[in-house]
Image (cartoon, helix red, strand yellow):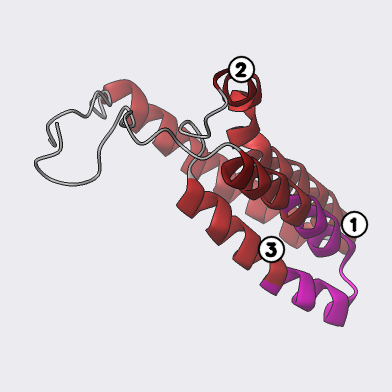
Amino acid sequence: MFRGCSSPRWGRTMALATGSAFVSLLFIAAYARASTSQAQQVGFLAMLICVCLYAAPLSELGQVIQERSSERLPPVQCLMQFLNCSLWLVVGVNSKALQVLVCNIMGLLLASAQLTLIAVFPPSPDKQSDCCLEVGCE
């Protein structure tokens, strides 16, 4: 484990949760294959989950504004979200797929908001993040 990283270990509970999620995914896939209508329902569920994932970094919004520092926002994730949503938005426009359009427009707007916060409130140079990705970071 890297020094300075306080992430918990991936234990039995996480393994069980991951296995349960995988089994649920198989049931959802079987449900979606049954009919076009059911596939649409799964698409809307996926859209909702996608938007929630895109908005997750904004849970730190109050702290970012209070500290006037975007240290708590993941800049690489926000940038990749922006690029990913931009590309999928092109696919959604070309295929006229409502779920692809909605979740990627929302994702693009949320990524733009997060990147704006990072630009307006840059991370303080004297503070380090809680979990360093570089080996030897203390």
Q: CA distance from mark 2 to mark 3?
A: 29 Å
Q: Residue at x 61, y 17 (%)?
A: 66
In the depicted view, which residue is nearer to us: 84 or 23?
A: 84
Disc 2 residue crowd, few under 14, some 14–19, many 20+, Cα 10 Å: few
Q: Is residue 95 magenta?
A: yes
Q: Position of residue 83 (x, y in %)?
A: 61, 67
Q: Earlier in the sequence, mark 2 or mark 1?
A: 1
Query: Callout 1 environment at 10 Å: few (<14), some (14 to 19), or many (20+)?
Result: few
Please provide percent x and percent y for residue 87. 68, 73
User: Which contiguous range is marked in magenta?
Assistant: 87-107
User: Marks 2/1: CA distance?
Assistant: 46 Å
Name the residue nearer the viewer: 52 or 26.
Answer: 52
Residue 36 placement: quadrant: bottom right
- Residue for badge 1: 37
Query: Percent position (x, y) of residue 65?
Result: 64, 24
Residue 125 figure quarter = top left
Image point 71% across, 52% down: which residue?
112
Nearest to viewer (mark 2 / mark 1):
2
